[in-house]
Amino acid sequence: MGSSQKIRFDIFKHELVPKHSILSKDEVEDLLRRYHVKKYQLAKIMARDPAAVAIGAKPGDVLRIVRRSPTAGLAVFYRFVVEG
């Protein structure tokens, strides 16, 4: 393999990488209204994060991250995509 070729794989196939998805505009509005917050008040994720890159997230997007939890079953987190 030449030095210019990169090995690519689907990071979401790894058991420790939770499911990430980009929320629609309507979903973002509902989320912000439900929790009475602004986008910038959400926890942040950098646009260069491998999971954000893999799903095509851009700065300004809001991501839903669903993780397995031993106590809650599934736990849902939201992240605001920022530059970087």
Image (tube, rainbow, N blue to C red):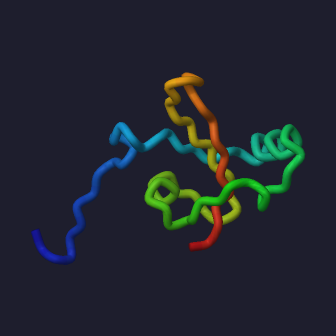
**Residue found at the far front of this picture:** 71
* Most foreground residue, 43 or 63: 43
Where 2 falls versus 14 (above or below)?
Answer: below
Residue drawn at 55 percent across, 23 percent down: 71
Residue drawn at 86 percent across, 38 percent down: 34
Residue 57 in the image, given as x and y percentages of width and height = 57, 57
Where 25 falls versus 72 (above or below)?
Answer: below
* Most foreground residue, 7 or 78: 78
- Quadrant housing residue 23: top right
Residue 46 in the image, given as x and y percentages of width and height = 57, 65
- The reply, left or right, for residue 35 in relation to residue 79 is right
Residue drawn at 33 percent across, 42 percent down: 14
- The reply, left or right, for residue 30 in relation to residue 15 is right
**Residue found at the far bottom of this picture:** 3
Residue 2 in the image, given as x and y percentages of width and height = 12, 74
- The reply, left or right, for residue 50 in relation to residue 36 is left
- Quarter of the figure with the N terminus: bottom left
Q: How many marks?
A: 0
Residue drawn at 74 percent across, 54 percent down: 42
- The reply, left or right, for residue 75 in relation to residue 25 is left
- Quarter of the figure with the C terminus: bottom right
- Quadrant housing residue 59: bottom right
